[in-house]
Amino acid sequence: MKPVIVLVGRPNVGKSTLFNRLTRSRAALVADAPGLTRDRQYGDGRVGDRPYFVVDTGGVVSSLTAAKDHGDVKSGVTAQVRTALTEADAVILIVDAREGVHPADRELVADLRRQGKPVWIAVNKSEGRDPDAAVAEFYALGSGDPVAVSAAHGEGVTDLIQRVLEKLPVAEETEPDENVPRIAVIGKPNVGKSTLVNALLGEQRVVVCHEPGTTRDSIRVPLDRDGRRYTLIDTAGVRRRARIDDPLEKFSVLKTLQAIDEANVAILVIDAHAGVADQDASLAGYALEAGRALVVAVNKWDIVKESDRMWAKREIERKLSFLDFARVHFISAHTGTGVGGLFHSVDEAYASAHRIMTTPKLNRVLQAAVTATPPPLAHGRRARPKYAHQGGKNPPRVVIHGNQVASLSKSYRRYLANTFRKAFHLIGTPVLIECRQEENPYQGKKTGGGRGGRRTKRRRS
């Protein structure tokens, strides 16, 4: 198994920047604001032929050994760091060269010694300085030889990670499994997305607080359930664009949209007590446009009065009628009621999104659909679909060839998509219809008539 290297430090010392540098990605949200990272974030790194896991954590200023969980954000972040340290093979404590040795750095070093894990000190923001001068005062922390680095510019990072890996055993690398479903949990702020992720995992993996906007980044969490592997992605809540003033929230929303694009299946979480809002429908529409399979989780169902439940169901059917192919679950993430059933729908949607549709059956279904309901006239002409084949998966794409098929209306394409969905038992996934119109062989050819009794041929387009 690859070694696990955990990044810890005070807020705003550059942990997420170093995480992105080590993983050669932009997976962690980075901004010039303290306390941005709250949940632990995992990533893959490599130096030469040495692979490793790296874990980004939230900034801590209080004791790791004495802090208790009281449910607020700060204690939740500290609990996340403590959990990450239990998994660590080595720890990199990041300090700020510009600020010098901070009292909180001394406290963190003392706490890390009690953990019994190898600790390396990375003196970040050392660009433009003599390396020896930058690290001189950090020897006072008494944790080996500090290394001067610049996470933003990449200076000293390779030297740092090589030193860390020299003390760790070499592990065999396994090929990543491309068949692992990626599940993005999406929704408005404060609908219970993080609570649902924790319920699915069976542990307090991500920070949960009654304050809206607790989750700021998209957190990827591996999960094994009933012998199958998944990757859960907890995302930040998405509000209407007009209400977003904070630049950090704009970045969080961008991360959420990227997570939707990356996922195979999206679980849309709706607050049952608040009902379906326009933003719920807008977010579902974005996932649909991205071609993602969908499962709808109506959360907080336990606090909806029995007399109001029928009305709530009708509202969901009315406002989310364009998601009639998706399974709807009425759950309580807080109590765990109905949460287990989500996996069956996720598996069903994932399998449907990757289903192979044979060409002979596609053509039989197409001809039967056209015979039952011929395409409407467009500009005085009727389209004539001739044959179809599968053009892709995730989502399923059906390519239709024929005369004038480019003129098929959106409603007729929906009719064909629903017909294919029913014939191939596709649950929870959109079906894309692509039309490829055949060229008219007579288009552009000049045919002459005239003398000698020859008749003039008309061009037909």
Image (spheres, grey):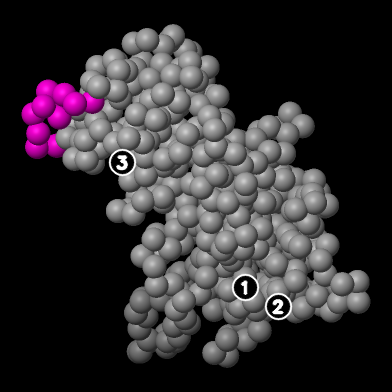
- The answer to whether mark 2 and mark 1 are in CB contact below 8 A is yes
What residue sits 44% from the left and 28% below the top?
6
Residue type beneath disc 1? Ala
- Quadrant in the picture for residue 109: top left
Of label 2 and label 1, which has the lower sequence position? 1
Dot 3: within a 10 Å radius of its alpha carbon, few (fewer than 14), some, or many (20 or more) residues?
many
Q: Which residues are magenta?
A: 127-138
* 137 part of magenta stretch: yes
Question: Mark number for residue 281?
Answer: 1
- Quadrant in the picture for residue 181: top right
Does 445 sit above or below residue 112? below
Q: Which residue is mark 2?
A: 319
Q: SS at mark 3? A: loop
Query: Picture coordinates of residue 66 (x, y %)?
Result: 54, 33
Query: Picture coordinates of residue 150 (x, y %)?
Result: 21, 35
What residue sits 48% from the left and 19% below the top?
114
